[in-house]
Image (cartoon, rainbow, N blue to C red):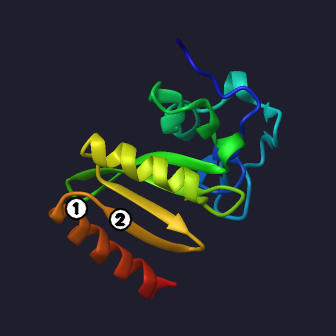
Amino acid sequence: MDRSCGTCTKCCEGHLSGVVRGIPFSPGKPCHFVKINAGCSIYEDRPDKPCKRFKCMWLTELDFPEWLKPNLSNVMFVPSKIESHDYIYALESGSELDTKTLSWAVSYMWSKKLNFAWQHRGDWSAIGSDEFVRAYLEYDKTRATKS
């Protein structure tokens, strides 16, 4: 079973950061080439980085339920790394992270022994190995002082 983005454009809507053809996008500023809820106006010629390389977890993990598709849940699950620690983070992408989604995600990540961080109302929390949580808290402290 293959999954596709279809009309989901959450990764391009200004929740993540990147540069496409020299034009930056970032939180609050969508990609210049996105047609929200329709797709990419340069899809066939989109660059490898960040466009072709980026895959939300809904696309890559077939055990993520259909209702977690980012345009349905307003949450993107994104693989990332802090120091030597791989982790997944849930990023609010259009509305507040709800209890159903967070409960599913915590249970899933815990059962798979995955490091996990999530955003809720602009604040971040994390669970996982002791080493990851320490690294994440240090990263979060650094991020807070830059704000």
Q: Is residue 17 visible in this depiction of the protein?
A: no
Between disc 1 and disc 2, the foreground one is 2
Query: Quick check: marks 1 and 2 in contact, CB under 8 Å?
Result: yes
* Residue sitting farthest toward the top: 1
Viewer-proximal residue among 99 and 24: 99
**Looking at numbered disc 2 in the image, what kind of residue is underneath it?**
Ala
The residues bearing labels 1 and 2 have C-alpha atoms spaced at a distance of 9 Å
* Residue sitting farthest toward the bottom: 145
* Residue 137 screen position, x and y as percent: 30, 75
For residue 14, the mark is none
Q: How many marks?
A: 2
Q: Is mark 1 on a helix, strand or loop?
A: helix
* Residue 94 screen position, x and y as percent: 72, 57
Q: Mark 2 points at which residue?
A: 126
Left/right of residue 45 with respect to residue 138 in the rendered view:
right
For residue 132, the mark is 1
At label 1, counting other C-alpha atoms closer than 10 Å, the crowd grade (few under 14, some 14-19, many 20 or more) is many
Left/right of residue 12 with respect to residue 61 in the rendered view:
right
Q: Residue at x 55, y 68 (%)?
A: 120
Q: Is mark 2 on a helix, strand or loop?
A: strand
Q: Residue at x 77, y 31 (%)?
A: 7
Q: Residue at x 48, y 37 (%)?
A: 57
At label 2, counting other C-alpha atoms closer than 10 Å, the crowd grade (few under 14, some 14-19, many 20 or more) is many
* Residue 121 screen position, x and y as percent: 60, 73
